[in-house]
Every structure is written in C-alpha cells, then in structure tokens.
Image (spheres, rainbow, N blue to C red):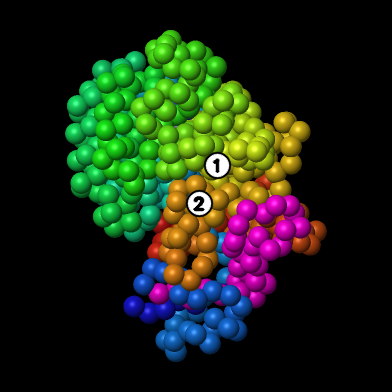
Amino acid sequence: MTSTLLRGRTLTFRRRPLSMDDTQAYAYETDGALLLRDGLIVASGAYNAVREQAPEDAVEIDHRPHLILPGFIDTHVHFPQMQVIGSYAANLLEWLNTYTFPEECRFVETAHAQRIAVHFFDEMIRHGTTTAVAYCSVHKTSADAFFAEAMKRDMRMVAGKVMMDRNAPQGLLDTPEMGYDETRAVIAQWHGKGRNHVAITPRFAITSTPEQMSAAQALAAEFPDLHIQTHLSENRDEIDYTLSLYPDAADYTDVYANYGLMGPKSLFGHAIHLSERERDAMSETGSIAVHCPTSNLFLGSGLFPLKELARREKPVRISVASDIGGGSSYSMLRTMDEAYKIQQLLGERLNPFDSYYYLTLGNAKALSLSERIGTLEPGTDADLIVLDMAATPAMALKAEVVTSLSDELFLLQTMGDDRAVVETYVAGRAAKTKLA
Ligand code: GUN
Ligand code: ZN
C-alpha cells in the first residue's frame, strides 16, 4: 500500500493541560506532517523530518494552513435516535415515552436499521467524529446493522444491543434471558471483527428488572474486558423513580454497584446530580461520568459540575459526548461550546486546551483506547481531522484577528460545526470528501 504524507499544522496532546500556559501538555508543529501507511500513523513531527522518512512514491497532501488533529471521539450517542433530534418535550421521561421509545420500535425492521446506519456513519464522518460509543436499539438486528456498516467504513466503534425488559412499549422489550443471549450472540459475531468493540448495554435501571441487571452482571463477569454503558442520575424525577424501583439501594449509583457494573470500563451517561458518596464511589471504581452538554441543556436536565468533579481529592474520570438524539448536534465542536457555557453558568472556566484534550486524548483515555486513538503518536490508528477556522464568512472575519493557537481553538469551538471539518481521515483514507 502506498504511503500518504499529510502536511499542515499538527496538534496532539500528551496529557491533560493544567492551565492555559501548560505548553508541555501538547505538541504543536507550525509546519508539521504525518506519514500514514496501512491505516496507521508511521511518523509525525516537523515536516522536514517526517518527509525524510517518506518513501519516494508517497502521495503528499498539503493541508496548509489548516490544523490537523486526531479525530474526535464521541463517548455516548444513540444511533436509533437520528429522527428524534429536536423533539419538543418538557423533560427526560416525557421525551423518552412520547418520542424516543416509539421511534426505537421501528428498528425491529432490518431495512430501516440498515438505512439509518448509513446516515449515522455519514454524519460521524461529516462532523469529524472517527470513534463513537453507541447505543443500538433493543433489537439484535439494529446492532448487526450498526456493526456491519462500521466494518464497511473501517471505523473503530464501540456499541451494544440495548437490554431493557420493563417500563417501555412491548415492541421495545426483551427478557433477562433474551438480553443475555442476544448480547452474547452480538459479542460472538462482532467483537474484535474489523475495528468493532461490543459494549454491555443495560439502558438504565428504570427499564431493567433486577433479574435483567443480574444478567448484565453475569455478562460483565464473563467478559471483563468489554465496556459497559448505561445512564445515571440525569433528571430528578428519573432518580426518584429509580429509587422507588430499587428501594434497598443507598442511592442511584448504588443500584449499579450492587450488580457489579462499576469499573474502569463503565461509562455512565450524564451523572449530573451525584452526592458526595456517589462521587466517591465513581472515583474509587474508576468509573467514567459521561458529560452530554447539548442534551442536558435541551432536556433541561441540569448543569454537570465538570470542573468540580475533575479537581476533587478523589477525582471522577470524565468524558464528553453528543447524546444524539437528546443532544442537539452531532458536532463535537458544538458540544464543547455548550460544555463551556455550562461551566460559565457554574462560575468555572473551561479553557480551550482542556476542551480539545477531552475531544481527543481525554476521551480515548476514558475508553482505555489511547494506545490506538486520540493521538498523533506513531503506531496509532490514522484517524484524523483537518480543521479550518475560516470555514464560513463570519468565522473568516473573526479569524482575521486571531493571533494564537488558543484563540484559534476557541474560535473553532465557538463558531464551528461540520463546515469547519475540511477532511476526515479514517484508517489513513480520506473519507469526508468521498461522501456521496
Ligand atoms: N435514559 C435512558 N434512555 C435514555 C436516552 O435514550 N437518552 C437519554 N438522554 N437518557 C436516557
Ligand atoms: Zn443516552
């Protein structure tokens, strides 16, 4: 396979930035390059040094003056909710019952699941998201459609067949046995195939009986390397309802702890209204709180205390996500703009370096996948994006007065969306400009 040499300004993180001035936290090359071969980054750094390592027949693509970054990672998104976005509801439970559950029922049809999967991957690529952690529907066929499309696109994806056996329409319910058997079948069929990762996915405590939670626990014990994803403490009425269904639990987090579902590969969507005890439990188990800012604002769920959770003595691991279709944008740039505003309302500062750390290396670390994605390190997957801070007339005008990298990142986050993504490379191949 021929090699590709990308030229542009390159930015990658080494660790979480401690402040705006923490230049050791990242590597930035004003005339940088990446050498790509067989889906991997084989060299990165200053253009002249990388060029010397490139074979004669390498194809050079000049992306100057744009910025090349690792592809964005979205750690919580619902693939069957592409047609739920923008549904007018007062709160989470009304939104689920009125719009979301009926829509997900349609995924019993294989043809529908396949059609939406094509759109889903198109949107990920269009928005520069190269890895996502997705909920499918309860139907195994939805997971089959999702993973088949992921393999076609050669994208690194984490996803699971949802387990839910109560408090939803009949067409959206499995049973403890079905949830267990079908999740095992999805694992056997798809985990480790191509770049696919299967996640154990009990939707949340309200829609799983104690028997199904035990089935999820059995899966977690049998497949300890798999990710687990669910929802936690998103909305006050949801919390009260959960505690009425699990009266013996000390709090909402304790429900999942009692079924052995916490740990360093467990992703808890939202986790907004946690007590100090719950925060300690999250921290002690290395569990991840997944911040979904556009969703939290859209559904009026609450203000996620990101900075507070990150700086406490027992810090909580955090990732960021779109939560489509509770979320209102596929764009991880829009997502961080809303994350920034939430911290503003809480009297906290979220600096641009911190934001882009979360979108790349931070989310990769939260998924225990930083050996593969979220960085421009040689040896990792060549999943990359190219960003243009002057993508629209209004952005170009503002860009005239931008004088620093932090200003550029902040402009992209504040005004950018899919239009700012010039190209998305998946496993070393240009994917966005190839979209139909
Ligand atoms: N809680 C349980 N299911 C869902 C869902 O689909 N979206 C959101 N935002 N919260 C949930
Ligand atoms: Zn969700």
Q: CA distance from mark 2 to mark 1?
A: 9 Å
- Identify whether 379 is placed above or below 300: below
Q: Which mark is residue 146?
A: none
Q: Main secondary structure of the magenta part?
A: strand
Left/right placement of residue 423 relative to residue 25 reads left
Q: On the image, which quarter does residue 26 sit in?
A: bottom right
Residue under the image location 38 percent in, 38 percent down: 228
Label 1's element? strand
Where's the N terminus, which quadrant?
bottom left
Residue 343 visible in image: yes
Q: Is residue 16 magenta?
A: yes
- Identify whether 142 is placed above or below 9: above
The boundaries of the magenta stretch are 8-37
Q: Which residue is mark 1?
A: 317
Outermost residue on the bottom side: it is 56
Q: Amino acid at mark 1?
A: Arg
Q: Which mark is residue 365?
A: 2
Left/right placement of residue 240 relative to residue 45 reads left
Judge: label 2 CB < 8 Å from ligand 2.
no
Relative image position of residue 73 (x, y in whole percent): 49, 50
Q: Which numbered disc, 2 or 1, marks the residue that appears first in the sequence?
A: 1
Relative image position of residue 3 (x, y in whole percent): 42, 78
